[in-house]
Image: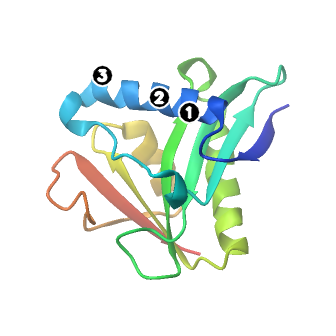
Amino acid sequence: MTTLVRVDWTDPDLQRLVTAQEAEVIERYGDEMAAQPLEPGTVAVGLLVRDDAGVAVGCGVLRDPAPAFQAGTAELNRMYVVPEQRRKGLAKVILRELEAIAVQRKVTQLVLETGVLLEEAIGLYSSEGYRIIDNYEPYEDSEDSRCFAKAL
């Protein structure tokens, strides 16, 4: 059984997973697609999923409000599951919990950016009701980015 835990942006397990996620993105895309840095004060909620042994194997964060949008819109960021734990539905569990947290926070829309080569991520977001939108700042000129939104 997995456990979901809310954490601060500075949590060591969250930072370890974020570092792994960033390394995977750079491996697929190169340095030009390195993740936009997140300032500690911009992350409203960090979320970890822990396996039966208590090891953090997945994460996601919620930025509320999303910097490029008006109040009521939050951004999903740093969604990641370690490779050996993929295809078990953990990303969907993280996504749905972040959506529930957003609703609790009175968020009416979620947005996110992912890479065009991340077919698994695009499939997840599409299957969960996210629709493709124009790329928003700071991704508006990136051909490697795909942005999504979902009304809550």
First reached walking from the N terminus: tag 3 or tag 2? 2
Contact between marks 1 and 2 (CB within 8 A): the answer is yes
Q: Residue at x 47, y 63 (%)?
A: 130
Quadrant (top left, top right, bottom left, bottom right) of the N terminus: top right
Task: Write down the quadrant of residue 13 in the picture.
Answer: top right
Question: How far from the left and from the top, in percent, is residue 113?
Answer: 36, 54
Q: Residue at x 81, y 25 (%)?
A: 54
Task: Write down the quadrant of residue 48 in the picture.
Answer: top right
- Is the residue marked by circle 2 packed among few (<14), some (14-19), or many (20+) residues within 10 Å? few
**Residue beneath label 1, please?**
15
**Residue beneath label 2, please?**
19
The answer to whether one can see residue 47 in this image is: yes
Number of the front mark, 3 or 1: 1
Seen from the viewer's position, the closer of residues 62 and 131 is: 62
Number of the front mark, 3 or 2: 2
First reached walking from the N terminus: tag 3 or tag 1? 1
Query: In the rendering, which numbered label is found on residue 27?
Result: 3
| C-alpha distance separating marks 3 and 2 | 12 Å
